[in-house]
Image: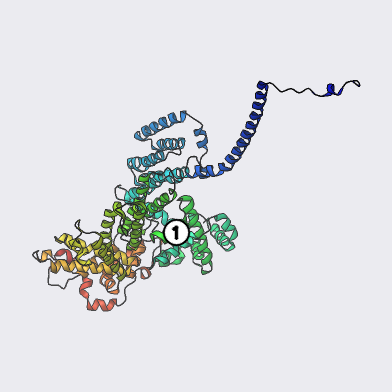
Amino acid sequence: MAGDSPSMTRSITQPLPKHLQAKLSAQRKEVSVQLVAGALALFSLIGAGLLMGPINTIRKERQFVINPETIAGLPPELELMNKLGTFRALAIDWAAIRAERLKMEGKTYEALELHKAVCRLAPRMPKLWVFAAWNMAYNISVSQYSPEQRWQWVQNGIKLLRDEGIQYNPRSVTLYKELAWIYWHKIGDVMDDEHRNYKRALAVDMERVLGPPPITLTDEEYFDWFREVADAPTDFDAFLRRDVAVKALAEQFEQLGLGPDENLLDFVARTIRPETQAWQLLKDRDVLDSTVRRRLEILQDPANAAARDRLLGALRSKILREKFKLDPSRMLRLMVERYGPLDWRNAYSHTVYWATLGTEVAEGYANVDRNDEINTARNVLFALHSMVMGGRIVLWPNFDEPFDSYIEFSTDPRLIPYLYDEYLRLGKKYFGDREDFVEGTAGPVFRNGFVSAMENWIQVLYFEGGEKNLALAENFYAWLRKNNPHPDGSTQERYTKTVQEFVLGDVLDQLHTHRAAAGLVRTFIKRALKELGLGLTEAGVSSLRHARLAHRYWEKDAADIKRTDRLRLPPIRIMLRDQIEEMMREPQLAALFKVRLWNALPVEQRQMTFDRLRPYFEQLCASQRPPWDVEKALPEPPGMEEYRKTAPEAVLDVRPEDVDYGERYKR
């Protein structure tokens, strides 16, 4: 109002009561706390979002979750089974019990499906995969009645681990150890009655894909042969579209009934071999089917050589990756960097591949089983040593009936330096931090196996012969003399001899009987013939030298045995002649190998056996389908007419020596 005084227009201010002031202050603090908490929550959410990527990566790497990338393309029932929740454990128990019951009842295929179901109910439990694979490869396989069925179940166990279990658990060293063990023990070792058939089947299967390994003088030549496969493009379809020359060549084969698949590799493996080609030995090329002839012409055409090699290399790479789950580039890297010229027809090479892969992927993995990791590494050592002692393969495959293939094994000293380095590397890796570890040794745990293996290596190198091998044997012998003394530090007496005395002492000491002496000499001769047939001339000559040494030892040096005509051995050349004849008549030995061996023998040895073998040669060539020309395949050696005049007793099998060897040698 106009008449109001100024004092009436001023606000009346009075202090709030204390309880109201406290309430207001508390409300202000609460808002501040809420604002700060909200900001922290926001920052935490942002931080958590940023960390989700690295955390998920770690979870996948350490297999805390199933990585969808590792199971891409596998059956979709995994997701459905995992939704069973609590009842999944009951389903696993029921399926496992039921599978065992079915196995005992002989219902093996139903048991197989239940085993697979159990594994997929708990895909991240490696022990389940191991148990199922073991059941198939060992228990079910030995319950079968034919080698084909037994081999199929061994393969089922391998495929379960290799194609499924490892995809679910790519960093489980336990699975790699078990897979490597099946290759080493079930196929490579001799414990199973059908082990030779398993070896034949695997070798034929791999030779169908890769072809026979070439005869080489150096490791580098072998690596270069495999490099065509390792360096091939991984996308086969894109490669065909991109490479015009290869595409045109593939189309030519398709018009002749051979698509760019295993059928083409099968045809190549059957017809084209590096040492000889059966079709070149035919009496009449016109007997070839026109389609087969045209295929051979395309393969042999020099204008197609470069495109053919690229096509075969890419196709072999594709089959290795898709069928065997083998990475060709990794296979080559293992050979070049660590293990030397591995023969992939050999089960031991597959042991090495999977065992080394297992130890590598387990590096840094939190849940790794230390014992399984070390045992996986041991598989590598076992496999390499087994290849040294008997890993070189002589294979003449029967692609239609693999179990009828001819297969033999001999020592392979090429791998010894690589195995020596691997012992030192693994010893230092696993035991280098121990107080009792000595640099330059395999460590305390591997020591006994290392020393025992080295003594075997010295024997292998000595019998193989050659300046390089003998020098290496001397080096290993010096290592044993220095590093394997008596407990008191003194040198062991057996290391004070020469290498020859060390090696031959045990061998010649076994020659206490006529039978043992004859058997040892024949063994050396047979080995020499196999080596000559493989083009291993130096090794073959060395084996013949040791055959003569054993023969001379029995005839002259074993004076403690009273010599009679009955206890004497036939002359070494007669024993050699008989072994040549025996090997040539061996029914399981492939005709192509006999051709190669015959043409590799020295002239005098062919002259000594030709007249006796000529009827068999004619029969052998006539039995081929289509028949071979005996003059091309197994020709008469030069100088045969003169030989018949100067050495008729060798042709007629009459011994000029004074000793009467009995009627057996007068046939």
Q: Which residue is mark 1?
A: 333
Q: How is the image coloured?
A: rainbow
Which quarter of the image is occupied by the C terminus?
A: bottom left
Q: Position of residue 572 (x, y in %)?
A: 20, 69
Task: State the residue in front, 371 or 483.
Answer: 483
Considering every residue shown, the one lying at the far right of the view is 2
Which quarter of the image is occupied by the N terminus?
A: top right
Left-right relation of 96 to 450: right
Q: Name which residue type carries label 1.
A: Arg
Task: State the residue in front, 298 or 510.
Answer: 510
Could you tell me which secondary element the residue under label 1 belongs to? helix
Task: State the residue in front, 283 or 523.
Answer: 523
Whether residue 282 is visible, yes or no, is no
Other residues around mark 1 within 10 Å, as few (<14) / some (14–19) / many (≥20): some
| Residue name at image x 61 percent, y 33 percent | 37
Left-right relation of 540 to 158: left
Left-right relation of 36 to 594: right
Q: Quadrant of residue 573?
A: bottom left
Q: Position of residue 176 (x, y in %)?
A: 40, 47
| Residue name at image x 50 percent, y 57 percent | 315
Whether residue 538 is visible, yes or no, is yes
Q: Count the marks: how many?
A: 1
Q: Position of residue 403 (x, y in %)?
A: 35, 52
Q: Position of residue 6 (x, y in %)?
A: 86, 24
